[in-house]
């Protein structure tokens, strides 16, 4: 075998020679880069994508809320803290407060029987009431407004209530 002569005219030994095949080196680099990207993507998905949280009770309630077109039924027992011509605001024993809007379809139940809501409310501030209604578009509307315990069978019999 004849020795190779370098640019300067020096003889180059075997340990100083360039590798014969650069293609193999490029192939290794080209294969390692996508493989490392694949490993990084898998690690990211493992850390971020596998955590599944169990739904909480509030998540289940939120899922049960009907669409904006539907109405969510609500009820409340409490004391009136504000009374106006077109709304009442009640506070429950636990401190929950909600304002209910009165409509022409709201039924008022008192010891004298039931009637449609009128301009003069038969209820006053600090009076205990039971309210049944719906929530539509974020607003609560009273379907019925009854003196406390009148909605639990202590009111007049249904056959004595005159129809509209």
Image: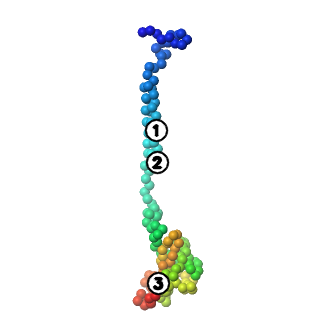
Compare marks 3 and 2 and give the one earlier in the sequence.
2
Disc 3 versus disc 2: distance between alpha carbons? 55 Å
- For label 2, the SS is helix
| Residue 25 can be seen in this image | yes
Q: Residue at x 43, y 66 (%)?
A: 64
- Res. 37 mark: 1
In the rendered structure, are the residues bearing label 1 and label 3 in contact, judged by CB atoms less than 8 Å apart?
Answer: no
For the residues labelled 1 and 3, the Cα–Cα distance comes to 71 Å
Give the residue displayed 58% in from the left and 78% down from the top: 82
Q: Nearer the viewer, mark 1 or mark 3?
A: 1
Give the answer, above or below, for where 10 lies relative to 136. Answer: above
Q: Secondary structure at mark 3?
A: helix
User: Which residue is under mark 3?
Assistant: 150
Residue occupying image coordinates x 46% and y 48% = 48
Residue nearest the viewer, comparing 152 with 74? 74
Count the numbered circles shown.
Answer: 3
Question: For residue 48, which numbered disc appears in the image?
Answer: 2
Marks 3 and 2: CB-CB under 8 Å? no
């Amino acid at each position: 075998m004849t020795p190779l002569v370098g640019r300067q005219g020096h003889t180059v030994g075997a340990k100083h020679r360039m590798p014969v095949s650069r293609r193999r080196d490029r192939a290794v680099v080209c294969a390692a880069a996508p493989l490392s990207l694949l490993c990084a993507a898998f690690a990211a998905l493992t850390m971020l994508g596998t955590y599944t949280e169990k739904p909480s009770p509030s998540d289940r309630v939120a899922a049960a809320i009907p669409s904006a077109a539907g109405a969510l039924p609500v009820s409340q027992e409490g004391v009136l803290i504000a009374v106006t011509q077109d709304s009442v605001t009640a506070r429950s024993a636990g401190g929950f407060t909600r304002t209910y809007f009165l409509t022409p379809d709201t039924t008022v139940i008192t010891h004298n029987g039931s009637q449609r809501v009128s301009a003069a409310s038969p209820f006053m501030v600090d009076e205990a009431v039971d309210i049944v209604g719906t929530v539509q578009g974020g607003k609560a509307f009273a379907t019925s407004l009854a003196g406390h315990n009148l909605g639990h069978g202590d009111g007049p019999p249904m056959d004595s209530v005159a129809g509209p």
